[in-house]
Amino acid sequence: MTGRRSAPARRVVAVLDFLVERPGERFGLSELARELDLAKPTCLGILNELAASGYLVRDPGTLTYGLGPALVAAGRVAQDGFAAARLARAHLDALSARYRTTCTVSAVAGEQIMVLESAGPGPVKVGQTYPFAPPVGLMYVLWDSDAAFDEWLARPPTVPVRLDAVRLRQVVKECRERGYLVESLSSAGWRLYSLMAGMSAHELPGEVRDLVGELVSNLGERVYLGADLAPRRKHEVSLLAAPTFSPDGRQELVMTMYVGAAITGAEIARRGTALVAAADAVTAESGGRKPC
């Protein structure tokens, strides 16, 4: 269950997110206040506090601000909590080179989905976030406990969602048996994910909600079932995804291979097998185990 949000804290996060998304750049007070739609006194107070704590540095000559060394220490501690993501990097590189595509590893962080590692071409960036609420996030609970799945499903949706319980139960069953998910996504769907990047569920603008309304937002409808995939016929595939597991057997990360093209059912199976093998290797290397 989500609690009350703090507007002051969100403003601090907005400042940090803005600078993280622009590595190596520095900005003055006026520019930051304008870009983040903050009053100058409010923005100055945030900048002074973050600079005093070492999370930002202030250049006395240009009077501009950039990221500070305290974030390095915080990042190292945070990274230790996602050690499996570091281990996944070599496997992402190998998959990306083999299939000449973008491969990522991501996880749920609070109320958002965050990309932790990325390999290969494409616009997907490390640190990119998406809201973790239906209809987004199915793959992050698909291989977890039934309780985790039900908790996600009960979250207030980002947009109105239609639920075909029979279809969804079949998706869960088949993906758990197969070990990976195959998702079909239209060009409108790609645009939707692009617009949702970096937003929280409660921040989605009307443009995104209208676009989702144009899509079939039935949970599980974009996932191919086994009966949908003919070995010799080509299928429009957005991505494939497979899970890694923690030492207690819980789903931990999602490894994703982007496709964005029509490929045969046989090729889907080959790529899915390779992706699951990589995910299983990360699980083993991080001391995790698959659930019984």
Image (cartoon, helix red, strand yellow):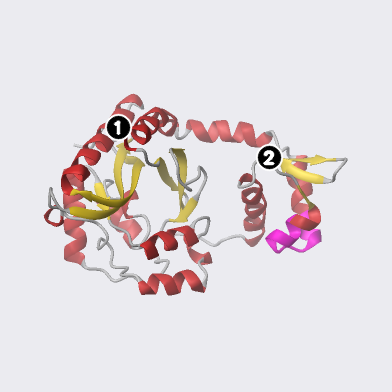
Q: Is residue 101 above or below residue 211?
A: above
User: Position of 109 compared to 235: left or right?
Assistant: right
Label 1 sits on residue: 278
Q: Residues within 10 Å of mark 2 (few under 14, many from 20)?
A: few
Q: Where residue 24 is drawn, which disc sits there? A: 2
**Residue visible at 73% across and 42% down?**
66
Whether residue 274 is visible: yes
Task: Estimate the x, y position of residue 279 in percent, counting from the top left.
Answer: 30, 34
Whether residue 155 is visible: no
Task: Estimate the x, y position of residue 5 in percent, counting from the top left.
Answer: 56, 61
Tell me the kind of residue under disc 1: Ala
Give the extent of the magenta segment. Answer: 32-44
Q: Is residue 253 above or below residue 200?
A: above
Query: What SS does tag 1 mark?
Result: helix
Q: Residue furthest right?
A: 61
Task: Estimate the x, y position of residue 221 in percent, counting from the top left.
Answer: 25, 63
**Residue visible at 36% across and 30% down?**
94
**Tag 2 near tag 1, CB within 8 Å:** no
**Residue visible at 46% across and 44% down?**
115
User: Position of 147 compared to 165: left or right?
Assistant: right
The disc, 2 or 1, on the residue closer to the chain's N-terminal end is: 2
CA gap between label 2 and label 1 equals 33 Å
Q: Is residue 36 magenta?
A: yes
